[in-house]
Amino acid sequence: MTNSQHLPNQELNQKPKAEAKIEATTKVTAETAPKKDYRFSNSKTKKIAITAILIALSFVMPYFMPTITLPFTTFTLFSHVPVIIAMFVSPFTAIMGCIGTTLAFFLKTSPIVALRAASHILFALPGSLAINKGLFTKGFSIFLGGALLGVIHGAAEIIVVAIFLGVTDVSFTLYYIMIEVGLITLGHHCVDYIFSLVVYKSCSRANLLQNKFLFAFKKNLNNS
């Protein structure tokens, strides 16, 4: 048998080996290649998407959430949640969230409610600036910051309602506004703030939002 007769058999034997080598190389390349992360990254695209979602939520929530009506004011359950979460994200997102809430209440309710919604910028913007600088983000300071922002929130709405109703003297009406608007707004703010923290923390664990809060309450066991 000549060498020319052995060539076809050698080629047939070498072909499976070559295919196996290619498959092995492809497998190694696939295993060692960096995997794509399809989760949100801390990018401009992410911030724009989150801002758009929060604006949409702040706009539609007044239409679907229950509303409590009182003589001088109304309260929509969880209406502050989109604005507060926007405050956690960035100052720009906080401003846009306030604009969305103001437009929603302007179209749905009376001008006084829309003005109260517009006054949210007085606590949302300073709060966002503070949180994004690391203030009110650890332990009990988280809730202290929420309470302080709630006081600003309540005071702003008292001023808006008093000016809109033309109340200028310290009377029973002004006192009633302080109780009905101020204290109830403070309580409403604190409830929505805690709920917003829960939602924000859940989103940060899912890598949808940046985790900015550290809930660590350490006891000093050395003191006796």
Image: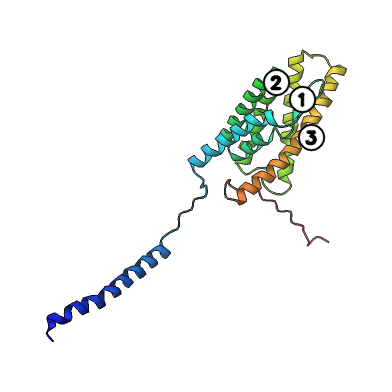
Residue found farthest to the right = 172
Left or right: 181 in relation to 92: right
Which residue in the protein does label 3 denote? 187
Q: Within 10 angstroms of label 2, few (less than 14), some, or many (20 or more) residues?
A: few
Which residue in the protein does label 2 denote? 109
| Residue 50 appears in the figure | yes
Identify which amino acid the numbered label 3 is placed on. Gly
Q: Earlier in the sequence, mark 3 or mark 2?
A: 2
Q: Secondary structure at mark 3?
A: helix
Which residue in the protein does label 1 denote? 74
Question: How far is disc 3 from disc 1 in space, using C-alphas?
Answer: 14 Å
In-front residue for pair 144/9: 9
Q: How is the image coloured?
A: rainbow
Identify which amino acid the numbered label 2 is placed on. Thr
Residue found farthest to the bottom = 1
User: Of tags 3 and 1, which is closer to the observer?
Assistant: 1
Q: Secondary structure at mark 1?
A: strand
Q: Earlier in the sequence, mark 1 or mark 2?
A: 1
Left or right: 39 in relation to 87: left
| CB atoms of marks 1 and 2 within 8 Å | yes
Q: Within 10 angstroms of label 1, few (less than 14), some, or many (20 or more) residues?
A: some
Q: Quadrant of the N terminus?
A: bottom left
Q: Residue at x 65, y 32 (%)?
A: 124
Q: Within 10 angstroms of label 3, few (less than 14), some, or many (20 or more) residues?
A: some
Residue 74: x and y, percent?
77, 25
Q: Quadrant of the C terminus?
A: bottom right
In-front residue for pair 13/62: 13
In-front residue for pair 29/157: 29
